[in-house]
Amino acid sequence: MDSPVARADCSVAELLLPWLLAALMSAGLALVTIWPGRAGAQRDPQAEVQRRPGGAIRIPIPVPPELREGLSPAAPAPAAPPYYREREEGWFWYRSPAEDAKPPLPVPIPPAIVPPTSKIEPPANDPLQRLARQKEDLERLQALAILEPTRAHVAAYLEKHVALMEQSARFADAWQNVVWTTPEYDNTLQAPTGNAAYIQADVQSEELDQRLTEAAQGFGLMFFFRGSCPHCHRFAPVLKAFAERYGFDILPVTLDGGALPEFPKPQGNVDAAAALQVESVPAVYLIEPRTRTVAPAMFGYVGFSELAQRVDSALGEIAKQQNTQGLALNGAAP
């Protein structure tokens, strides 16, 4: 049987065991917290055991290396090597410091274009609107008179119609007055009509006759035809009368060997026709024998007055070629 003293020792041990375990755990946690900072410091024998207020004792507990590595804080980043060891960059290398990233500039948003809500109203006395209203009123009265042809409706339409006709007549009179009193607006001065047209035509005809008569003294006409061409037979009397009136010499040239009653002895100058590229007949060319310059006058059948106009036009073409090289006959003689 156990003695009372043994039983008392066991009771004390049972009471002190939890307290000792708690003290050991607290000391271990405190050591783990402060130990990494003091790993490289010189140990102080007097500091191995410290007494806390109230009689508590802090006992340092050694921590195994494998646990110390897991509990140590992260190692600091290695320092940058000195500049003289960076031989690849050279002595004069300049390294710009890292710039802080700047936020992108805001893109300005243009204001939205708002269409105008109101239209520009024309003036109250706008002539376009007045004229449009007159036309609309006339059409409305006309439609009413057609759909309901009563005496009142027809009379209203006729009244509006007569009023607009008088308005148009006043405009026409004003127009004519301005034209008659302003020469630059009078087209009858450039293209007269009536008796003035006959007078001007006579004057122009006299001037044309004088130019053609003078031109006949130094120019001739080449007449290309075929004996089998009916248009050539019809045109030959017109050309002969023209030449006799103004005095032109005519050189008839046949392309098929045939002759015409007005020109019984034509020449077969095929070279001249080839040089002038004559393809259709009858054809008349104006020629200046001295310089052997040629200008086409007409093709096909034309009347006397039109022939005179075309020969006069050919005279103008010859005049433009006096200082330039024109079409030559390449050996063809008039």
Image: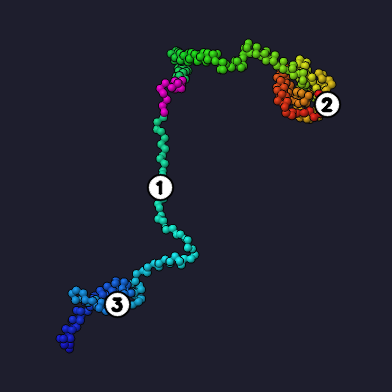
| Alpha carbon distance from label 3 to label 2 | 144 Å
Q: Report whether residue 172 is seen.
A: no
Which dot marks residue 43? 3
Q: Nearer the viewer, residue 174 or 148?
A: 174
In the image, is residue 324 part of the stretch drawn in magenta? Answer: no
Above/below status of 11 relative to 317? below
Tell me which amino acid carries mark 2. Answer: Gly
| Residue 252 x %, y % | 80, 22
In the image, is residue 126 part of the stretch drawn in magenta? Answer: yes
* Quadrant of image for the N terminus: bottom left
Above/below status of 12 relative to 71? below
From the image, tell me which residue sits under label 2. Answer: 268
Which dot marks residue 106? 1
| Residue 333 x %, y % | 82, 25
Image label count: 3
Q: Which of label 2 and label 1 is nearer to you?
A: 1
Tell me which amino acid carries mark 3. Answer: Arg
Q: Residues within 10 Å of mark 3 (few under 14, many from 20)?
A: few
| Alpha carbon distance from label 3 to label 1 | 62 Å
Disc 3 + disc 1, Cβ < 8 Å? no
Name the N-terminal-most of marks 2 and 1.
1
Above/below status of 102 relative to 19? above
Which residue corresponds to the image point at 19% horizontal and 76% vertical from the top-left? 55
Above/below status of 116 relative to 316? below
Tell me which amino acid carries mark 1. Answer: Pro
